[in-house]
Image (cartoon, rainbow, N blue to C red):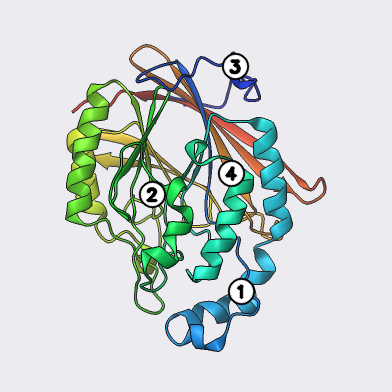
Amino acid sequence: METIAVKPNLCEAPGERSVTTDEGGGNVFVLAHFSDPHLSSLKGVPFTALLNKRLLGYLSWYHRRRHVHCPHILDALLRDIGEVSPDHVAVTGDLTHLGLPDEFRQAARWLQQLGAPDRITVIPGNHDAYVPEPWEETFREWAAYLAGDEPAADGTYPMLRVRGPAALIGLSSARPSAPFLAVGSLGRGQLARFEKILEETGRRGLLRIVLLHHPPVPGSIARRKRLTDAGLLAEVLGRQGAEVILHGHAHLSMAHRLVAGTKNIPVFGVPSASHSPSNRQRAARYHLCRFERRGDGWVMLLTERVYSAADDRFVMARERELFLPVQRP
């Protein structure tokens, strides 16, 4: 069932909602999802840092990306999310352009403006893993935003955060790739751990929200940008189920359904959160996802908020409502 309808107040004060941090607690959960902000600047990058695939990325930034990824739009995003005050924020990758250590420091300062690490979940993107770099010089800057509820070794995925009735399960598809490629992969080890988490959180009756950077639906993006082991991911989801999947990477609004065995799982992607409105299809936007328990499933109200240059703010573009049945093994 999918309709355009119903407009509950997404700007309720947090105290008016029934969400708690206890296992399975609450009936309503509001998640803001954005992706691909490419928020760092490459001004002053030394040439010696570009003696690899990064040179191609730098040329792309210099000739195109620096003109379409706009800091003032990210300022408007901070204001809007602050006003809406969701229960949690998910960022599905590509905070940087080339994955340089200084870019990670820039992004860390921006994340601090967005909010506290326990209210923001960050998943790596392919640009954040542009070329191999030590964890200590890069992702450690965001460690508190990347971490799950349980201690784990640096860079180990999936990560799990339970917030009220929701299980936020973060996968990392970020891998360095050859020039002119932006593919991602999950790997059998991560998928095996993912299956265990899906089974455990499903048994606890939690709303399982899967977060990753690359679109998981085969054929939904160009081959050079694909998730290479999407088939293996679908096998795991076909056995265990999940209620919804959120991703970025494509810089477009996307709505698909992943057919995994007998399961039919909704999949939503968002454009870049900083893209100039000069291209209407790619204009900056983010999603507000309101989940409410209803019988043996969840009603999801998805609100798209798009940047308006005329108002210098994000405004509602459209809403859609759908029912998410509990996906049982």
Relative height, residue 172 to residue 51 (above, below): above
The crowding category of the residue bearing disc 4, from other C-alpha atoms within 10 Å (few below 14, some 14 to 19, many at least 20), is: many
In which quadrant is the C terminus drawn?
A: top left
Determine which residue is flagged by label 4. 286
Q: At x 42% / y 84%, what residue is drawn? A: 52
Type of amino acid at the residue the image marks with label 2: Leu
Marks 1/2 in contact by CB < 8 Å: the verdict is no
Determine which residue is flagged by label 2. 212
In three-dimensional space, the C-alpha distance between marks 3 and 4, rounded to whole angstroms, equals 24 Å
The crowding category of the residue bearing disc 1, from other C-alpha atoms within 10 Å (few below 14, some 14 to 19, many at least 20), is: some
Residue 307 x/y as whole percent: 70, 47
The crowding category of the residue bearing disc 2, from other C-alpha atoms within 10 Å (few below 14, some 14 to 19, many at least 20), is: many
* Mark 4: secondary structure: strand
The answer to which image quadrant residue 27 occupies is top left
* Mark 1: secondary structure: loop
Q: Is residue 321 left or right of residue 52?
A: right
Type of amino acid at the residue the image marks with label 4: Tyr
Nearest to N terminus: mark 2 or mark 3: 3
Relative height, residue 101 to residue 154 (above, below): below
